[in-house]
Amino acid sequence: MSDTLLSAQRSKNVEPNVDQSETSDVTPRRQAILDAAARLFSDQGFSGTTIRQIAEHADMESGSLYYHFRSKNAILQEILVFAISTTASEVRETVAALPEGTNPRMKIEAALRAHLQALHDHIEYTSTNGRYSGQIPATVHITVQPLRQKYSDFWLELLREAQEDGAIHENLNLSLLRPLILGALNHTMDWYDAKRGNIDELFGIIKIMTSGIWK
């Protein structure tokens, strides 16, 4: 994860009501801390990771880490903000780039493909958000929840537009459909290795699995 990428995504995606006290411009040392923490959180969870371990993996002393972040919670918050905002941004950009008049099914399938790709492109960051949600401290949860809710609302609106257009069965409860579909995609982070596999092949199966929602 490059510092240029993270800085650009942060400036573009962070919501006004998200605490940015810990999201200043990314220096190489700060980036090293974030990358080290993301790897550790992804592998062993937030609760199972110590500041000392993060510092060791970032090749610095524990005390030096506090110059860049005030706490482990602050590190987690920045990782989650990046994971949620980047995924949401890449999906929205994919949908916005579709030709005018694209049918609802193609639009949703393009969004699902972009969501899946974003998860695996940024796996160490996104898996922390997906795998260990139960370990997220309440103060961090309160900060990142608006981002999650905004992305959830985006998906609900996509599905609603498709249903109103007659593309999705009218008797389907979209409030149940959305988490079922996205949950299935998010769960691939637990078992699928995109470095060894093929995202297009995986998504082909997902399209078959979701084919029953369409008229």
Image: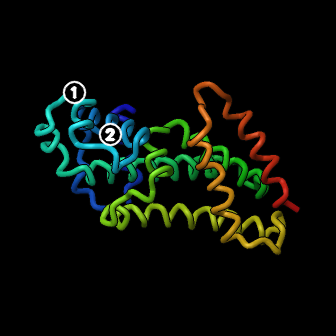
Quarter assignment of residue 199: top right
Task: Decide if residue 142 is on the left or right side of residue 70.
Answer: right
> Which numbered circle lies on residue 180?
none
195 or 54, which lies in front? 54
3D distance between C-alphas at marks 1 and 2: 12 Å
> Is residue 35 among what the camera can see?
yes
Instruction: Tell me which residue sits at (60%, 48%) in the image.
Output: 187
Quarter assignment of residue 190: top right
Callout 2: helix, strand or loop? helix
Which residue type does callout 1 highlight?
A: Asp
Instruction: Tell me which residue sits at (66%, 49%) in the image.
Output: 112
On the image, numbered disc 2 is attached to which residue?
37
Assess whether mark 2 and mark 1 are in contact (beta carbons under 8 angstroms).
Answer: no
Residue 102 lies, in percent from the top left, at 76, 53
Residue 186 lies, in percent from the top left, at 59, 49
Residue 35 lies, in percent from the top left, at 34, 35
> Which numbered circle lies on residue 59?
1
The answer to which of marks 1 and 2 sits earlier in the sequence is 2
Callout 1: helix, strand or loop? loop
Task: Decide if residue 211 is on the left or right side of residue 28.
Answer: right
Q: Residues within 10 Å of mark 2 (few under 14, many from 20)?
A: many
Residue positioned most to the front: 48
Residue 149 lies, in percent from the top left, at 49, 66
Q: Is residue 22 above or below residue 18?
A: above
> Is residue 16 among what the camera can see?
no
Task: Decide if residue 170 is on the left or right side of residue 130.
Answer: right
